Amino acid sequence: MKYPTLVLSVVFQPLLIPTLVFGLILYAVPEATSIPAEFKDRIFFLIVLSTLLIPMITIIGLRLSATLKSLHMKEIQDRLIPFSITSVYYLLTVYFLYQKTELDPILWQTLSMITIAVIGLTIVTFFWKMSAHMTGAGGLLAVILILGFKFHTFQVLYPLILSILLAGGIGSSRLYLGAHKPLEIYAGLFLGFVVCFLGFNWIWA
């Protein structure tokens, strides 16, 4: 049982969430943005590069240099540097997108909401070990709900069911692996959901 839960925990890591969110916005709900179809792949690659690949490579580099004791980051001290660096990467990407005035503002606004959740998680991590996995899962769930509310062409039922099952599966895997206590799971889910629900509701008000 431990191997499947570990795979679930590793595959659906928090860094994957921006990729999933932008994938939904750019491809599943085309009317959510005014970006021409021929530019979407480039934008998506930029998001994947800056919010997933570069932070992941950095974290692996920290581990190889022995700055990070374990990629699982079981202790609070292990999380502070990776979370802080990730926050900086996200802020820089938000600034880059903001400066590109020719692009749909939805891009920097979307990533800014995700970045707020990441920064909130990072701040909390200086004092308490809240679940980053569940912060991401809660944010993804909120985005899917808002897309369903705001865009009637979006078939929300199956994505919503999948996101709920995914959140439950991730939370259960983190508990089973002993990575978090129940309160840390619920707090992460709450933070991600509230920040993204309020933020994306404002974006598409």
Image: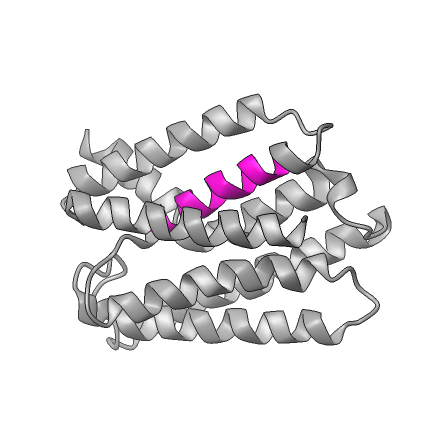
* Figure check: 93 above or below 15: below
Instruction: Between residue 82 and residue 203, name the one nearer to us.
Output: 203
* Figure check: 126 above or below 189: below
Spot occupied by residue 130 in the image (x, y as percentages of width and height): 25, 56
* Figure check: 149 above or below 32: above
Spot occupied by residue 13 in the image (x, y as percentages of width and height): 39, 49
- The magenta region covers 133-147
Instruction: Between residue 128 and residue 44, name the one nearer to us.
Output: 128
**Left or right, residue 160 beside residue 101:** left
Residue at 55% across, 54% down: 199
Residue at 67% across, 74% down: 96
Residue at 34% across, 37% down: 8
Residue at 60% across, 27% down: 156
Which quarter of the figure is the N terminus placed in? top left
Type of secondary structure dominating the magenta stretch: helix
Does 144 lie within the magenta span? yes
Spot occupied by residue 113 in the image (x, y as percentages of width and height): 54, 59
Is residue 156 visible in the rendered image? The answer is: yes
Does 173 lie within the magenta span? no
* Figure check: 147 above or below 198: above
Instruction: Between residue 122 and residue 89, name the one nearer to us.
Output: 122
Spot occupied by residue 69 in the image (x, y as percentages of width and height): 20, 68
Q: Quadrant of residue 56?
A: bottom left
**Left or right, residue 82 beside residue 21:** left
Is residue 52 visible in the rendered image? The answer is: no
Count of marks placed on residues: 0
Q: Which of the colour schemes (rainbow, by chain, secondary structure, one colour) is used?
A: one colour
Q: Quadrant of residue 39?
A: bottom right
